[in-house]
Image (cartoon, helix red, strand yellow):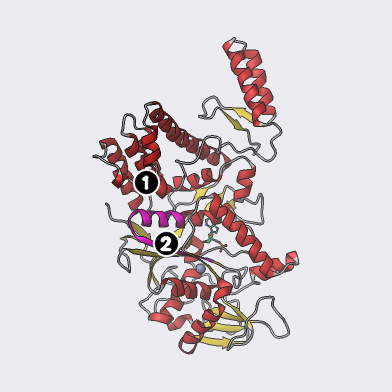
Amino acid sequence: MSELKLFNSLTRQLETFTPVHDGEARVYTCGPTVYNYPHIGNMRAYVFADTLGRVLSYKGYKLTHVINITDVGHLTDDADAGEDKMEKMAAEKAQSIWDIAKHYTQAYWEDIKALNIRQPAHWSIATEYVPAMIAYAESIADKHCYELESGLYFDTSTVANYGALARAKTEDGEGRIDEVEGKRHAADFAIWRKTPAGETRQMEWDSPWGKGAPGWHLECSVMSEALLGLPFDIHTGGIDHREIHHPNEIAQNQARCGSDHSGARFWMHNNFLIERSGKMSKSSGEFLRVQLLIDKGFHPLAYRLMCLQAHYRSELEFSWDGLQAALVRLKRMVMGVSNFKARHAELGSASYLATSESKTLKQVQGDVAPGISAALNDFAAAVSDDLNTAVAITSLETLIGLKKVDAAQHLAAIAEMDAVLGLNLLTLSRTDLRIRPKAAVITEAEIETALTARKDARAEKDFAKSDAIRDDLIAKGVEVMDGDPLGWDWKLDI
Ligand code: AMP
Ligand code: ZN
């Protein structure tokens, strides 16, 4: 199988993946700060990390994936300015931070499931690691930190090449704001934030530097080391983390293990999902959540496909038309697979299919048909080329479209590709993809009756009647799409 090449943000180059531990891949993904619902842009970061994990499994590595949940320490600004996002939301909602964290962690996990993102080996919850964070900070404090009234700060001049990941031109990092009085360098950052005198925070812990809470950057260094050991293979996150959060994690890892240690061999970053109006945000305009897509009648896997159609390093602009196109494409694939199953059932190979359902291609008897192996080779080459899922999808479509090939081989090959792309093609049905929008005023049975009447009218060449039925359906939110594989769809006023 082709070598796996991945783009390493550290070197800004494609590099061949070789694991730290033979046969294993250890991956850490910066997870959400659970102060609000994730938007679909955030979820692009996890679709990317999941795809990476699936490709590593496909390549035969035993994967250990960690995603953290940040329930303390992330300020409203990635530098040291602003309030703790969790404290701020708890105050706004007049709820306890713990309830806020629980609610939004649950909501995030629902989105993870809806997008068919595999469960990582560990969900590491930041507040469960605070004693480990204090011990870690103590271990580097003497050589690398200094104390100010507001907290314990990391001195970025104590490690070599600080900011190399961000390609910062000066040690202070261009454009960085010195928000805290007394910091030795603008880029220095808090690893422990003391609770200001006279205040109490909902979340605070005793430490050698007084009551307070850990810094956000410290969390990820501590949890990745605790669960994966240093160095591990790949650290992922959104492209914004390349500028501050990950350089700061690297600085801490260097303090812990020596300056030529960044902690992870590969640092990989997904680019942003953007809206036409610019950056995606939770507070302006329509809050684009996975649930909103479902409410508007889109199956969440159409969004997964939309992400996979773009390269993870390219910016992707969200549009409802783009999502609609992805949904139609997904439908075509699902129908292709079910037609193929039906075809083989007719030919009497149904029992063969039933027993081959769980077989891998290696377990299927006989030489693999040339059409199937060509599609598989193209697929392998595409995903090995820095996760080129856009091309891999076309290999899957070619495979689905093959005719007159052995049913068991065909099914096993589709399953192999689908395990990487995570589209659930073997279990999704066309009816699963027809989601009734929340605002719909007509039932599916009523639509079917109207469509039968329209068909009869067309058969009788009564086009006035058939157009009237179509117009009536449109008025009720249903568009008759004669070119669409499912024939009708909910019309979305967006
Ligand atoms: P947060 O909960 O803000 O820490 O973000 C969670 C993840 O989403 C991080 O990896 C961010 O880098 C990533 N992210 C934030 N906004 C976007 C976006 N519009 N598109 C893709 N990834 C994003
Ligand atoms: Zn992180």
Q: Is mark 2 within 8 Å of ligand 1?
A: no
Q: Please, which residue is most extreme toward the right here?
A: 94
Seen at 63% across and 33% down, the residue is 491
Residue 87, picture quadrant: bottom right
Q: Position of residue 67 (x, y in %)?
A: 50, 64
Check disc 2 and give the amino acid type. Answer: Met
Residue 14, picture quadrant: bottom left
Q: Which residue is the site of mark 1?
A: 416
Query: Is tag 2's residue or tag 1's residue first in the polypeptide sequence?
Result: 2
Q: What secondary structure is marked by label 2?
A: strand
Q: What secondary structure is marked by label 1?
A: helix
Give the residues drawn in magenta, as a range: 50-68
Check disc 1 and give the amino acid type. Answer: Glu
Q: Nearer the viewer, residue 108 or 42?
A: 108
Q: Nearer the viewer, residue 320 or 373?
A: 373
Task: Say left or right for 8 vs 466.
Answer: left
Q: Which residue is the site of mark 2?
A: 268
Residue 100 shows in this picture: yes
